[in-house]
Amino acid sequence: MSKNSSARGHLFVLHGLIENFDYDAVIVPTDHSFVVEPDWESVAKHLDRARPANWPAEFGRSGAGDAVWFISVADERLLTDQDLVGRVSGALRAISDADLPTPDGRVVRRVALPVLGTGAGGLGDRRGAILGALLDALQSEAQTLELDILLVTPDPAVFSAAQHARRNLQAAGSRHWELDDAELDEASRLGTLAADGHLALFLGAGVSMAAGLPSWVTLLKDLGKRVGGLPDDFGNLGSLDQAQYLAGKLGAEQLNDAVTDIIGKPKKVALAHALLAGMGCREAVTTNYDDLYEVAVEATGRTRPAILPWQSVDQQRPWLLKLHGDIHRSESIVLTRRDFVLFDAKSRPAGSLLQALLLTKHVLIVGASLADDNVIRLAMEVDEYLQQSEDRAEQGTFVDVSGVEARKHLWRGQFRWFVCDGSSPRHRVRRMEVFLDAVAAYAASDAPWLLDQRFDGLLPEWDRDVVAQARELAAATHSASGLLAPMRRALRALGGA
C-alpha cells in the first residue's frame, strides 16, 4: 500500500501534455524491444540508461533509477484489452510499493500516464473498448492503492470520450468522484453551463500557488529580502503599504522587474489550471501575473488565449483579462497602494468587462479570497444594479478552500458557495481539485468522437445502427454540392470522415 495519508486516491482525466504536470512517478509506453518514441524524451529522461534490467518484460522501472516505469504495449503478438489493463495495474502496484518521496503539501502521491496502447501499440482501432477498460481499472487502483492517477491526453476526441465514459460509469453506480449527491449535482450544473457557453472563469492566486508560485505574503517577503535593511516595524504595515515602501526603496520599475524575475521562472501547471482549461470556456479573468493558465489552454490544442488589454479578440480565440498585469509586461503589474488606488482611473474598461461577465454569464471563481478591494467594489456595484431585477440569480459560484464557512454569508444571494471540506489547507485544495475534475467531465462535449468507428466500444448496442447510418451519410456528403457544406461540417465535427 501507498505510504501516503489515509485519503482515498482519485483518477483525474486531463486534457493536455504530461510534461506540463508535476507528478511523483510516470508510466511511459514502449515495446518488447524497448523502442521509446521520441516524443517521450522530455518525460523519460536518460533513455540511454533507462532500459529496465528485467527487459523484455511486461513492465519495469527505469534502469537509470528515475521514477519512470515502462510498459510494453506491443509484444510479438497483439495485446488484448485485459493484457494491457493487467500490465497497468501491475505497474501501479510496483509504484505504490516503491520508496518514493511525497513532496510537502501533497496529500496523495501522483502518477501520470497517457491513454496506453492506442498509438504505436496497435490497439487504436479499439480505443473505445480500451478506454472503458482502462478507466474502470484506473479508478479502482487509485482508490485501492491510495494514488492520485493523472490520465493525460492531448487528443480532444479521446478526452471527450473518456469523460463520456466516466459520466456513464458514475450513472451506473460506479462512483468516480468522492462527492455527495448535492456536490455532484453542483458539478453537473456548472459543467452544463460550460458546455452551453454560459460559464466564465475568475482565477485567483490560490490556483497558481498550487503550482509552486508564491502567495502575496511570500512574494512581499522575497521582495523584502532584495531590498534589505527593512525597519523593525515593517511587518506592521498592510500588504499594499509594504509594497509601496519597497517600490520607494527599489523604484517602481525595478520592483516590477523583481516580481517578474520571481514569478516568471518556468513552472509546472497546477491541476486546477488544466482542469479549468479543459472546460473550454471562452472568457476568463485573473488577478495572477503568470502565464500558466495560457500554457494549459494551449496544451489542449486550442489557440492560446488573447491577453487583454494587449491583444485583440476574435471569434476563433478565447480571451483572458489580466486585471493586475502580466509578467511579460512588467510595467503593467499592479502591486502597490498607489497601483490599487489608481486602478479605476487607469483601468476602468477592464473593471467594466468583469462587471459585464457578472451580468451576462455565470462566473466560476477559483483560488480567490475576494479580499481585493477593487474586485469587491466591482462585484458590489453589480449587485446594487441588480437590486431592481425581478428574477435575479446569483452572479457566479465561489469555490472556497479557506475553511471559514461563515464567509459565504457575506455574499448570500450574490454568489453560490461551494465549501471544500478538509482538515488542512492542502486537503481542502485537493477537494477542490476533485470537484473541478467532476465539473470538467460534465463540461466535455460528446461531439468529436461519436462517428469515429474506433470508439464503437463506448456506444450502447441500440445506438450503433444509427451511428453506422450517420457515417454513411457523412461519406455521401463528400460528393454532394456546396449546398450541403453545413451538413458536411456538422458531421465532420462529430468524428465523421
Image (cartoon, rainbow, N blue to C red):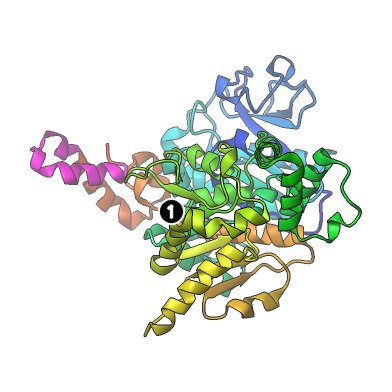
Q: Tell me: 347 left or right of 1.
A: left
Specify whether residue 174 is in view: no
The secondary element bearing badge 1 is classed as: strand
Say which of 391 and 280 sits in front.
Answer: 391
Specify whether residue 381 is in view: yes
* In this view, 331 is above or below 75: below
Residue at 67%, 56% in the rendered image: 337
Q: Pointer 1: residues within 10 angstroms few (<14), some, or many (20+)?
A: many
Q: Quadrant of the C terminus?
A: top left
Magenta segment boundaries in residue numbering? 475-495
Residue at 74%, 22% in the rendered image: 52
The amino acid marked with disc number 1 is Glu
* Whole-percent x, y for residue 113 in the image: 62, 38
* In this view, 22 is above or below 69: below
Q: Tell me: 257 left or right of 160.
A: right
Residue at 56%, 24% in the rendered image: 39
Say which of 440 and 76 sits in front.
Answer: 440
User: What predominant SS class does the magenta segment belong to?
Assistant: helix
* Residue 158 occupies quadrant: top left
* Whole-percent x, y for residue 103 in the image: 80, 44
* Residue 96 occupies quadrant: top right
- Magenta-colored stretch includes residue 91: no
* In this view, 125 is above or below 355: above
Residue identified by numbered label 1: 283
Say which of 48 and 259 sits in front.
Answer: 259
Q: Tell me: 479 left or right of 108.
A: left
